[in-house]
Amino acid sequence: MLSYRHAFHAGNHADVLKHLVVIDLLRYLTQKPAPLMVIDTHAGAGRYNLAGREAQKLREYQEGIGRVWQAKDAPVVVTEYLAAVRELNPSGELKQYPGSPWLARQFLRPNDPLRLFELHGNEARALAQTFKNAGRAIRVVKGDGLTLLKSLLPPPERRALTLIDPSYETRRDYSAVIATLKDALKRFATGTYVLWYPQLVCLESRQLPERLKRLPADWLHVSLSVRAPTADGVGMYGSGMFILNPPWTTADALRQSLPWLARQLAQDEQAAWTLEVSTIDGGAKIAPTEPPSRRAVAQNTPWRTRSRQP
Ligand SMILES: C[S@@+](CC[C@H](N)C(=O)[O-])C[C@H]1O[C@@H](n2cnc3c(N)ncnc32)[C@H](O)[C@@H]1O
């Protein structure tokens, strides 16, 4: 029984990181004229009313999009993200927040298929309603996105971006995403896959990035902690995105944005970010040259990557 509803969390710090990464990927991948399939395995409702009862209950958006919405000095990736959120808020007042399907649609060309999966009945109905007259390139399917992803790979277009954004309501989700990505890479090794995960104190969450790094593909891992974990271990203190087969430009774009973003979203002096990349060379993954770095925002040390080009 699923109880997670994204409307309670829409626009929070994790959505900011997730959506600006997704926008960067979409912008890069739609530069080539060849069609691109976009798959969202955990689509949610598509868009969210920030004045609604759910968003108002916790007001998480105030610590996320609310902190960057009016920024005048944002780095380029953040500016593109803010422009996409503004499309939904033409009056200039932040009232609506776009979910990943809504953002994807803004970037797709008429011949780019968008496939949206959502398991929760109410969310799937809201999603279908949101995209009711959106045309044949967009399909909403109520079902398990992790299982149904198989049916789309390899895509006829031979180019695809897949977003996997589970709610991690059960600990099984952590193993399920690894199994899904392994299978997806076998079916379609050259696709770009991007997985979101929460930073929680539980072992499954802490171990997930290291497990993902063992997958047979180039990868980019970005994380943003907005505060220290609480003493009782309750709650999400940050989030991360793990990209398989990332565009080569994404690391630079994020490197230029993360220090600024971390300063804006920091809830205490433990706020920090990491950026790591690794490439495959002749079939063997190059070992990272340095241990992972966690840089406190206050240290003013802009970034560290773990990258070695073949
Ligand atoms: C974090 S929310 C998605 C938010 C959305 N991707 C966005 O960025 O706007 C996760 C969604 O996945 C749905 N969900 C959970 N398990 C699922 C599954 N196996 N397949 C498809 N959807 C699932 C939940 O109902 C929830 O709406």
Image (spheres, rainbow, N blue to C red):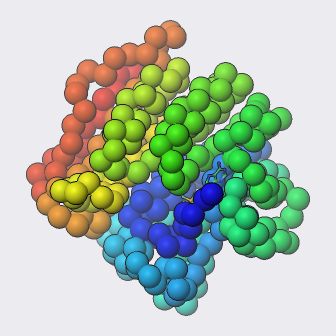
Q: Farthest residue in the left direction?
A: 299
Give the left or right position of residue 155, taking residue 18 as reference: right
Residue pictured at 29% horizontal, 66% vertical: 265
Q: Front-most of 59 and 73? A: 59
Q: In which quarter of the image is residue 209?
A: top left
Q: Position of residue 279 (x, y in %)?
A: 44, 23
Above or below for 9 versus 253: below
Q: In this view of the protein, can residue 101 be seen by the observer?
A: no
Above or below for 78 versus 66: above
Residue pictured at 30% horizontal, 29% vertical: 306
Q: Farthest residue in the front direction?
A: 1
How many numbered discs sit on the rendered protein? 0
User: Quadrant of the image for the N terminus?
Assistant: bottom right
Q: Where is residue 245 in the image (x, y as percent from the top left)?
A: 54, 32
Residue pictured at 26% horizontal, 21% vertical: 289
Q: In which quarter of the image is residue 97?
A: bottom right
Residue pictured at 45% horizontal, 30% vertical: 212
Q: Position of residue 207 (x, y in %)?
A: 36, 34
Above or below for 13 versus 172: below
Q: In this view of the protein, can residue 55 be seen by the observer?
A: yes
Q: In which quarter of the image is ligand 1?
A: bottom right
User: Quadrant of the image for the C terminus?
Assistant: top left
Q: Position of residue 91 (x, y in %)?
A: 55, 90
Q: Front-most of 54 and 134? A: 54
Q: Front-most of 19 and 178? A: 178
